[in-house]
Amino acid sequence: MISITADQIMTWALSVIWPFVRITAMLLVAPIFGARGVSTQMRLGFGFLLALMIAPQLPAPPMIDVLGMQGLVIAIQQVLIGIAMGFVLQMVFSAITQAGEIMALSMGLGFAQVVDPVGGLQVPIVSQFLVIIATLLFLAMNGHLVLLEMLLLSFSSLPIGVGGLVPDDFWALLNFGTIMFNGALLIALPAVASLKIVNLALGVVARTAPQLNIIAVGFPVMMLVGFVLLSILLPSVFARLGELMTQGFELIQRFIGL
């Protein structure tokens, strides 16, 4: 007859609970997994499935009371690690959304807004177009698989109960926001600069021909030029998106010590 002790049951439970906390925290924040179209039940179920799969490969977890103060500290550490990993890539998609908003305002399409399925917010249609491209590029690069692989490797480089993120990691996350803002400006800058030149030309036309209804003429011209510029600049946008995602994965590697 097989006898199972209470310590064995507690060890098995903890080997699943601690990975489940870190994995679920990442899934709730990361792009694609954290989209509004993905229900919370699906994220929790997927996180529990991943925790069950990797639990036998992890070292024995520390025997700590989950409901005690030390257990609360470890749970907070796991949540912060998971949120930081997912939030980095969420910032990349936010930078892409910001670039689309800047371009849409220059084109005169700031009022044309749709619901972003990733963030669940109202964004200009140009932002939605760039987010769709970024999502397809992210999937084509197997970014979702790379993110899951880094998450699973983090249990080896950041074992449960040994340590978590240090203050330098949080400062790096704040500095990464500056990098993403600069990246958004670099994506939108060529189109914005070109549209400013077109706007200046329309201003000269309005001064030389006051009888011309510049609003009726300039509005479609700005939109037409904006769409043409967007089609011309798409190859450079792809390259910039790839660079932003690569920088995001490099920061995640720094967090988990790979």
Image (cartoon, rainbow, N blue to C red):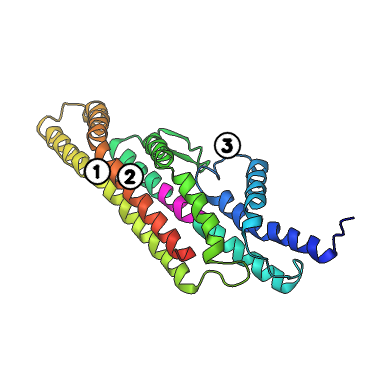
Q: Give the range drawn in magenta.
A: 86-93
Is 208 included in the stretch rendered in magenta?
no
Residue type (three-letter) at the residue carrying disc 1: Val
Distance between the alpha carbons at the discs numbered 2 and 3 = 26 Å
Residue 110 place in picture, x, y as percent: 37, 38
**Magenta segment, prevailing SS (helix, strand or loop):** helix
Return the residue at label 3.
37
Return the residue at label 1.
192
Q: Residue 192 sits in which quadrant?
A: top left
Distance between the alpha carbons at the discs numbered 2 and 1 = 8 Å
- Residue at the limit of the structure toward the left, as seen here: 208
The crowd level at tag 3 (other Cα within 10 Å; few <14, some 14-19, many 20+) is few
Residue 200 place in picture, x, y as percent: 16, 40
Q: Which of marks 3 and 1 is in front?
A: 3
Return the residue at label 2.
102
Q: Residue at x 48, y 45 (%)?
A: 144
- Quadrant for the C terminus, please: bottom left
Q: Residue at x 73, y 71 (%)?
A: 64
Horizontal relation, residue 138 to residue 8: left or right: left
Closer to the camera in the image, 58 or 216? 58
